[in-house]
Image (cartoon, coloured by chain):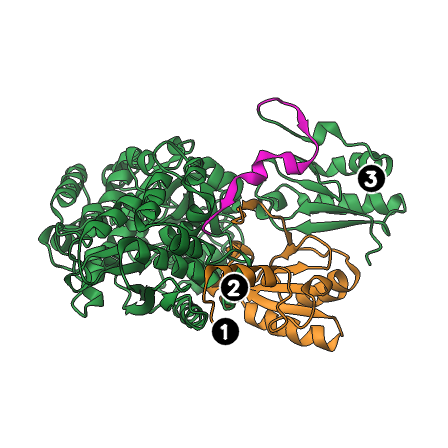
Chain colours: A orange, B green
Amino acid sequence: MSKITSFADLKKKREELKSGLDIRIKAIDPENVVQVKVALATCGIASGAKTVMEFFLEQLERRNVAAVVTQTGCMGYCYAEPTIEVKLPGQDPVVFGFVDLKRADQIIEKYIKTGELVDGIIPVNYQTIDLNV
Amino acid sequence: MSKYSMHLLVCGGTSCHASESDAIVCNLRDELEAKGLMDSVQVILTGCFGFCEKGPIVKVMPDNTIYVKVKPEDAQTIVEEHVIKGRKVTRLLYKDPVSQEPVSDSKNMGFFKKQLRIVLRNCGFINPENIDEYIARDGYQALGKVLTEMTPEEVIKEVKDSGQRGRGGAGFSTGLKWELAHKNQSDEKYVVCNADEGDPGAFMDRSVLEGDPHSVLEAMVICGYSIGAGNGLIYIRAEYPLAIERLKIAINQAREYGLLGNDIFGTGFNFDIKLRYGAGAFVCGEETALIHSMEGLRGEPTVKPPFPAEAGYLNKPTNVNNVETFAAIPAIILKGAKWFASIGTERSKGTKVFALAGKINNVGLIEVPMGTTLREVIFEIGGGIRNGKKFKGIQTGGPSGGCLSEKHLDTPIDFDNLIAAGSIMGSGAMIVLDEDDCMVSMAKFFLEFTVEESCGKCAPCRIGNKRLHELLGQICEGKGSLEDLDRLKNMSLVIKDTALCGLGQTSPNPVLSMMDNYYDEYVAHVTDKKCPAGQCKSLMEYVVNAENCVGCTACARVCPVNAISGERKEVHLIDPSICIKCGACMEKCKFDAIFIR
């Protein structure tokens, strides 16, 4: 990693990262692939989110789906763990709750492959601030 | 892509489920089938919308229409009108509470804007182990602005003007705290992050550290610049292994980028952060005890003054803030004090993160503007009480807080209102109690915690709380008297007045508030020797209902202490002197012939 030596440097880095131009971390354009985020906080892990994440990593590759699977923190829906967020290219992200391996399989086969929704969607009930002013 | 052009989302949350959302799904599918639309319209069962008060909810996508209080028989109308003819069913639309106008697009419903995420802005959004994702979300921009464009005084003024008060519980002005540490001259100063979250039911700080560790690191550097400190310490309990792991990764990544260390952004400012592990003692959340623990001494509080801002860690000026307090700082710097101060109530600004636990449907983490009511938190965001039970109370502020009852439901939550109601904000744990919870046992539960966690340094806390706990135990066993209730109250007040630190001074709060709000229940325990909630075992009696009992002997066979006698096909009898009230018989009985008296 190269050092960020000035504020201007940081701003430049942010712009690169925002537009996904940073080739070092993203060999593929994130806007054109499926993005899966698995909530891996203590609550999620305790309910089996790690197994779910491994399943997505393995199965998406095996089933030839171009996707990026990453971890994230607690989404706040502890009652519905494991929770994951799936973002199909060009669409709003959708959060699924109570994702066991069976539901994970459904999500890949139906939602990710055909865009068909499956049960267990968690409606977003909050707004988040945008720091960029 | 999907063959479906329209989706009907039916809420399958616990509360909507109870009001027949399954039947709605069935009917909708039947209707669609009958009209030959199964291939173009899909019905989906979703998690809780949080709008349980108006449930069951059906949302039509893509036009965002929300139908409320839908009954199974409405399925036909929805399909015929909305799906086929494209006309919204006005009578099922949500009506704006003020104008009474039907709201057709759910994006315009105030309800879905109840939660505002400032502290949790990145939680569940970015990968906490990748600093680049934090930077892409404007991470470390606030630090850049502070180091290159602002003087320490200006930063402190901004934080002061924002009106932010410490989220650890006491609610002291963050800006003022920084100013005090700034003014004290010293060759070395320290910034400490208090991550010793220890009250039962609290997981706000853990979630922030696990989900967005950099926000805390960034704020600590900003604080260091403001008060003139070069070293930061995070005091975190060893019971939070994942949070520790992610903090370590975050610190290393920040160092590699030069965002921690020497000459940050080429400004000549140096700051580094180290971790200190706590062994999980509740009292170490108190800042003087925390500092002693970091110094390798016993985690015991000392009298203030001197405040840590004068003589803290290693006797140097030290500023201690809570995780949540820090996590909001970058947002305050970037969006300005005015913006932050525009959110919340007169004297409590911004948002607060709460951990919802207990008998609530949507156990989880929420963030709402100060001034949101308890009713909104419990019944709208939290999805109401589990299993359709009745709400009884809510313990805010953990074992140092109080239990608020139904009459407080419409209280806007802020530091001052909660104190006026007899509780405290505390760190933000909310434990919801339902009709099955006994308020004497609950008080005993919290006292048990404080007795266990008391450091033992001062007598009121060490001895007083122990006595309180014993008295509550006696009351639960039916050995209490009315005088005991007075004794309970008096002793609580004395402990509050005389204990050394915050732990002792607040430990009687659950007892006092519960006696205040549920006095009848306490009286029932001592005069009638009854536990109205049916929790106190000593005050219960398992009895056989002679009318229902068929003499199957199942209860007698399952009883572990042979307290049940009776011939085959004859009414059985439970001997209360032998019965240990385990409840096994009641569970086993297929004829509802055993009940609690």
Mark 1, residues whose alpha carbon is within 10 Å: few (<14), some, or many (≥20)? few
Side of B437 where B129 appears, left or right: right
Q: Quadrant of the C terminus of chain B?
A: top left
**Badge 2 amino acid:** Gly
Residue B179 in the magenta stretch? The answer is no
Q: Which mark is residue B83?
A: 3
Image vertical order of residue B107 relative to residue A56, above or below: above
Q: Chain of mark 1?
A: A
- Find the residue positioned furthest to the right: B36
Q: B72 left or right of B99?
A: right
Q: Secondary structure at mark 2?
A: helix
Residue A44: mark in rendering? 2
Residue pictured at 86% horizontal, 38% vertical? B84
Question: CA–CA distance between discs 2 and 1?
Answer: 33 Å
Q: Quadrant of residue A31?
A: bottom right
Task: Please rate how many residues cluster around mark 3, counting C-alpha atoms within 10 Å: few if below 14, some from 14 to 19, many from 20.
Answer: some
Is residue B353 in view from this perspective?
no
**Image point (62%, 63%), residue name:** A99
Decide which of B536, B264 is in the foreground and name it: B264
Tell me the subunit letter for badge 3. B
Q: With respect to residue B369, does A35 lie above or below? A: below
Outermost residue, top direction?
B99
Magenta residues (range): B98-119
The residue wearing badge 1 is A2
**Residue name at image x 45 percent, y 51 percent:** B119
Disc on the earlier residue, 2 or 1: 1
